[in-house]
Amino acid sequence: MHKLLPYAGLLALAASQVMANEPATAKPVVPAKTEQLAPSIHPLTPADHSTSVSNKSRVLTSSMASSAQKVIRSKASKKPPSSAHSHQDELGPVQGLVKAMLAANQRYMSTKPAAYFARFASKQTPRATVVTCSDSRVQSNAFHADAVNDLFMVRNIGNQLATSEGSVEYGVRHLHTPLLLFIGHAVCGAVQAASGDYSALEAPIRKELLTINIPKGISVNDGVLLNVNNQVDAALLKFGGEVDAGQLAVIGAFYDFRNDYKLGRGKLIITNINGETDPARLAALTKAGNFFMVGNGMTGAAASH
Ligand SMILES: [Zn+2]
């Protein structure tokens, strides 16, 4: 397994990404507006940080780990636990949501000319296969102005290759996206569950947690970083031919919507490029726009593609 990216290293890496000249071709990966984010020194030690995140996450996430107890209580019956909470309680919110969604769709339709849809009416031509967690706080508008026809999105709990291997393979080998991006996120409930005892959860959920290979008890954000590295490693094994041929770049990133790493709320931090996790190397590769491996390793010069 990958060595954990040290906290200080991640901070330095992200800080250097803030300062790096961003190549125009890296639009899906590097946010456009980063100049206002000055590199800062985090006042907490890594140990303090881990504790802090761990404590907060127990409160803030609706994690599967915390729902394990409810499952135990209701295990005798296969029906959902009965309570005063009925579908009547949900009716108002659902009606409101459906109404809002239909209205939003109407506005969307009215603002897009026919030519907008004509571009992709018969064929999709995405540039990236993107694997994110299903977490509702992670959405592509955080890192792409309009992902339509550009990002082939694969979503599952814990942003994994193993549990959506066919979808990822389709993006890489049939749509030929030159970029495969794995995005983990702050306080991921799936990672948190995988780091603890999830034996009481439903079998299908257990199955999807089983492939998150992290140590029990690891702090949640460290677990997220490690899981992203593991996903990149698995992808490099599976798509080694494409990567070695310089046809595919595999990148890992951390989406920090809580500003846990003090680089700005919502920052997308690149943490892995084709298996490279050294902060200084990552910064250099990002600055040079060199995201492809050619031959036995990544070249210093920008690859020509
Ligand atoms: Zn998650």
Image: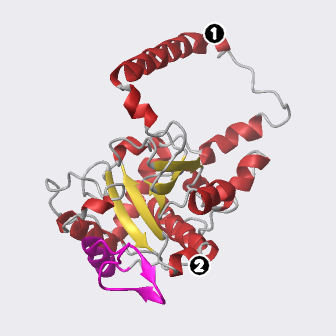
Task: Provide the residue designation for mark 1.
Answer: 88
Reply above or below: 208 against 252.
above
In this figure, which colouring scheme has been used for the structure? secondary structure
Residue at the (45%, 34%) spot, across then down: 118
Indicate the amino acid at tag 2.
Answer: Gly
Of labels 2 and 1, the one closer to you: 2
Q: Secondary structure at mark 1?
A: helix
142 to the left or right of 75: left
Reply above or below: 153 against 91.
below
Q: Give the quarter of the figure containing the N terminus.
A: bottom right
Q: Quadrant of residue 294?
A: bottom left
- In space, the residues marked 2 and 1 are separated at their CA atoms by 54 Å
- The answer to whether residue 197 of the structure is visible from this angle is no
How dense is the environment of label 2, judged by Cα within 10 Å: few (below 14), some, or many (20 and up)? few
> Of all residues shown, which one is farthest toward the bottom?
296
299 to the left or right of 101: left
Q: Give the quarter of the figure containing the C terminus.
A: bottom left
Residue 289 forms part of the magenta stretch: yes
Reply above or below: 176 against 283.
above
How dense is the environment of label 1, judged by Cα within 10 Å: few (below 14), some, or many (20 and up)? few
* Residue 35 x %, y %: 14, 56
Residue 40 forms part of the magenta stretch: no
Mark before the other along the chain sequence, 2 or 1: 1
Residue at the (36%, 80%) spot, across then down: 278
Indicate the amino acid at tag 1.
Answer: Gln
- Write down the region rendered in magenta: 278-305
* Residue 293 x %, y %: 44, 80
Task: Provide the residue designation for mark 2.
Answer: 241
